[in-house]
Amino acid sequence: MGFQDILEEIHSKLRDAPHKGVVASYIPELGKVSIKNLGICLLTLDQEEYGVGEFQTPFSIQSISKVLSLTLALNLIGTEVWKRVDVEPSGDPFNFLSLLELERGIPRNPLINAGAIVISDILYSNLKNPKEDFLNFVRELANDDTIDYNLDVANSEKKTGFRNVAAANLLKSFNNIQNNVDDVLDFYFHQCSLTMSCSQLNKTFFMFANSGKSIAGKTYLNPSQVKRMNALMITCGFYDEAGEFAFEVGLPGKSGVGGGIVAVHPGKYSIATWAPGLNVKGNSLLGMQALEMFTTKTGLSIF
Ligand code: GLU
């Protein structure tokens, strides 16, 4: 069976699933998306693409952007990043605050909200035009100039992102935010509002499967940095369900509350899914099932 047939079989099994999870609505703009969307896209290392369903429809990538902001921070200041944020799984929801108090303002890892807000602060200090420069970086990684922020989503989160405001202020009280809190949050909300399709996500994440070299052939991370990024994704990429994702799917990856998941098999492929209904842990319900079916059917997990 070829990859296209496998994706089609998975899609036809899941598209009419009675339980699709719940679309996130704590950011009101995200709640407007239809739960019926289901896209799956595979990009192999030799740049063959296979896709089914809504794999070319752009959606809000939300926390998936945290991998990209960390990549840029590593590009800019290297291992200095690890003085400001740890690399341990949190085992807690993405917006949990009590650990931050307990660990005196050093977030558990860069893929939870508090960690990503510190990374945003680092980028804010090191980029001339933070929003523009970050967007250009992502466009360059994906080799696609059409990728953009969704300002309705960014503004919607700005109005309701109370827990992120609390986290940023707590970080500031521990001197782990150097810039103005509102400026850093505005930048963070813009990153989360990045809009991409499954196809574009695969192209952007291609370098994590390809030893740090992007789809256009430019090297952004050295092999040791790629190893670390993939280690972080597998241990911290799925909120407090990273263990379950490794157990069921067996790939490094990252999810977002917009219902997207992107995962990579180093040396082999990148795969992305979009199904906006989330499970109770905040991960795409059908996306996780689709990826579990894919690695089980093909035997292509890293374990
Ligand atoms: N912008 C979202 C927030 O900060 C991202 C959450 C996510 O996708 O995990 O709440």
Image (tube, rainbow, N blue to C red):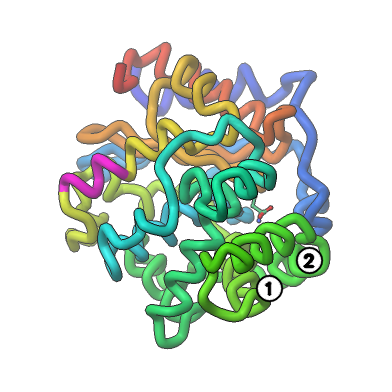
Q: Which residues are magenta?
A: 223-228
Quadrant that contains the N terminus: top left
- Looking at the rendered structure, which numbered label has been put on residue 96? none
- The image quadrant of residue 46 is top left
Q: Is residue 203 visible?
A: yes
**Please, what is the three-letter code of the amino acid marked with disc 2?**
Ser
Q: Secondary structure at mark 2?
A: helix
- Looking at the rendered structure, which numbered label has been put on residue 156? 2
Q: Position of residue 250 (x, y in %)?
A: 40, 21
Is residue 113 placed above or below 263 in the rendered structure? Answer: below
Q: Position of residue 33 (x, y in %)?
A: 77, 49
What residue lies at 62% left-to-right and 54% top-to-bottom?
Answer: 59
Q: Position of residue 67 (x, y in %)?
A: 43, 52
What residue lies at 47% left-to-right and 77% top-to-bottom?
Answer: 124
Magenta-drawn stretch contains 227 = yes
**Please, what is the three-letter code of the amino acid marked with disc 1?**
Leu
Quadrant that contains the C terminus: top left
Tag 1–tag 2 contact (CB < 8 Å): no
- Camera-side residue of 178 and 13: 178
